[in-house]
Image (tube, rainbow, N blue to C red):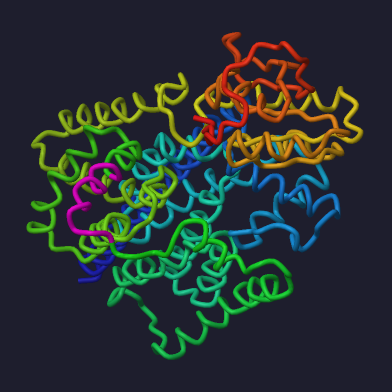
Amino acid sequence: MIHRSMSKAALQTQTSILEVATSVATTIQAARRIELQSLTAAAIIALAAVIRLALISGFRFHPDEALYATWARLVATGQDVWLATRVVDKPPLFIYTLAGLFGTLGASEEIARVPNEIASIVSVALTYVIACEVYDRRVALLAALALALSPLAILFAPTAFTDPLMLMWLLASAWLALRRRAALSGLALGLALATKQDAMLAAPLLVMICVSKVGEAKVRSSTLRTVIAWAAGFAPPAALVWLWSALRLAPDFLSASLAHYGSMTLVPIDEYMARAVGFAALTSNSSAPWLLLLALAAAPLLLWRERQRADQVMIGSIGYWFALHVVVSFPIWDRYALPLAPLLAIFVARAWLWCFDQIPTRALQRVAISAAVLLLTLPTVAVLRHEIPMGRDGGALDGVEQVGQFFWDTDTTATILYDHDLSWEIDYYTFGRILDRRWMPDLRALADDAAHMPLARRYVALAAWEATPADIDRALERVGLKADVAFTARNSTGSPAVYVYLLTPRVTGDSSHAASGSSEVLSLY
């Protein structure tokens, strides 16, 4: 009996040791898998950083970028800290972030792009952790890779637009909400609002994304307590934005925004199709088009078969943002499609992996995943070859910086510089130079104003596409002036990009192109 008892005890001990060993082995294997996934995620984020930083220089500011950078320089130099002399249609956070960088590192196109470079890279990391919360690590890794290689996200990283930084704060708000950090989520949304007022349009998205976790949280706070915490986080940045706007003498940024872009109204139904096609064309640059089509084609079957709340919420969020820009009179601009990039990256990754899981053998699954990754890289290669004209001027403004250098090398005492299409760019590239810069609505207005300034040196800067010398000569002849080319800025191909004309009195007998006293209003186009 003693022998049998000892044998039984030994057997139980061996069984326990085997169970513990199996558990330890499983834990080690899981830890190694998590470590490998974490390393893969870090590698994807590093890849995103390399691609984005490779494009930080080599092209000129878009007009809006030049405008924001000029505002920042006014703040950084102390010339207009509150921007009271400018009509500003954006909230202050991005502008003052640029001003801080300009004040410490100096003003340049590359420095102006640093905030969005960082924001775009952080957005890839945030997309990864959001997908981990909503789905799993497999989906998260593929979603992060899809955003890292997204042409839309890549091309807006090296810019000085407000959208990438706003998007980063929105993603941070969504992730914090999913983690049940209501106060911090509210703070992040407040910072998004302080970057660009369009952030409030995304508030319903945050609600829908957070709904995907309802019922899954281990600890639930009361709805009232959550709302109060969220409002407490949102209030400080919102209050600072309001205070900044109230202290300025110029119109508040919301009124200026509505004045510049028009009141946001519902568009006629007969315009829906054209707007949907236009916005879809922009959205297609968020990833590889064929993979987008695969995900959208699989979406109905995925919803029917799986019936997961997360899938419903992701498709609802994408549909909301798309429909909003079809039925409301927002301009169909590429940067307005940027918030769709992370949403599509997450859902498309989910749809791809679900489709791959339907493949019967693991070997074929690996082939399918490899093919998807290869397809993801093709648009990225096109971006690096400058074949996708989004997020930048496309070379149209090459040479405008030479105009700024021309006026730095020229005596500008008692000098007037007229411009039209290049107004914001010239403001930036001639910043700090004493110049009487004047915007002209058309060539007749130029002639009338220049005729009353006989003692000033008068220049006109016009892009090559704006007006021909004959048009300028006809407009100036009736006031006794003529225009001679003082400087020609050239683009990277050597073609003329911008002409700088010097206005001088016309000598009797000069050839003319129009009858004196003509009342024709000469357009610049």
Q: What residue is shown at x 76% (from left), y 47% (from top)?
A: 101
Q: What residue is shown at x 56% (from left), y 70% (from top)?
A: 190
Lateral position of residue 60 relative to residue 343, left or right: right
Q: Is residue 136 visible?
A: yes
Location of residue 497 with respect to 94 vertically, above or below: above
Q: What residue is shown at x 57% (from left), y 21% (from top)?
A: 514
| First to last magenta residue range | 267-279
Place of residue 99 in the rendered image (x, y in percent of width and height, measured from the top left): 75, 51
Location of residue 197 with respect to 461 vertically, above or below: below
Place of residue 24 in the rendered image (x, y in percent of width and height, measured from the top left): 38, 54
Q: Nearer the viewer, residue 170 or 417?
A: 417
Is 272 in the magenta? yes
Q: Is residue 113 visible?
A: no
Location of residue 157 with respect to 486 vertically, above or below: below
Place of residue 400 in the rendered image (x, y in percent of width and height, measured from the top left): 66, 26
Q: Nearer the viewer, residue 522 or 170?
A: 522
Q: Kindly give the residue lying farthest to the top in the view shown.
A: 494
